[in-house]
Amino acid sequence: MDGADANKFTLAGNKLTFIATAFEARSDVTYHVNIKATLNAKILPDIIETTEKTITVTVDEAFRITTANVSIPEHTNRTITLATNKDGASFTIVGNKGKFSLSGCTYL
């Protein structure tokens, strides 16, 4: 394993792992590592097969979760609008599911 960003990866067996860094402080979000595999044939020891592959990892901005506490008086109908800045995000009610419902991005 080599390349400009090889120190940001570990290779154990067939598993390449990216070592997390402080992404917020970095201006580069693309990392490159070269993997080289060599096969020594036991039948014909003079034949050595080698292949190399460059892997590029691009790190996107992490999805940020912001929480809020909301208090609503009992026996009143109120709605809370939920929002996200990422496409494909979803909302789930975890506790007291029977007392609340979700309709699109509205918490009823």
Image (cartoon, rainbow, N blue to C red):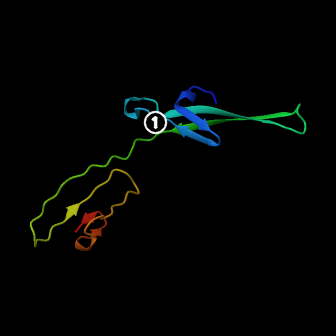
Secondary structure beneath label 1: loop
- What's under tag 1, amino acid-wise? Ala
List x then y, in percent, for residue 87. Answer: 40, 54
> On the rendered structure, is 88 left or right of 12?
left
What residue sits 57% from the left and 29% below the top? 6
What residue sits 31% from the left and 49% below the top? 65
- The residue carrying pointer 1 sits among few (fewer than 14), some (14 to 19) or many (20 or more) residues within 10 Å by Cα, namely few
Q: Nearer the viewer, residue 104 or 12?
A: 12
List x then y, in percent, for residue 81. Answer: 23, 60
> On the rendered structure, is 73 left or right of 14?
left
Image quarter for residue 26?
A: top left
List x then y, in percent, for residue 54. Answer: 64, 35
List x then y, in percent, for residue 33. Answer: 60, 32
Image quarter for residue 9?
A: top right
What residue sits 29% from the left and 69% below the top? 103
Count of numbered circles in the view: 1
Q: Quadrant of the N terminus?
A: top right
Q: Looking at the image, is 5 positioned above or below residue 73?
A: above
Q: Nearer the viewer, residue 2 or 30?
A: 2
Q: Residue furthest front?
A: 42
Residue located beneath label 1 in the image? 20
Image quarter for residue 14?
A: top right
What residue sits 12% from the left and 63% below the top? 72
Q: Looking at the image, is 44 positioned above or below residue 76?
A: above
Q: Residue furthest top?
A: 4
Q: Quadrant of the C terminus?
A: bottom left
> On the rendered structure, is 43 left or right of 22?
right
> On the rendered structure, is 26 left or right of 1?
left
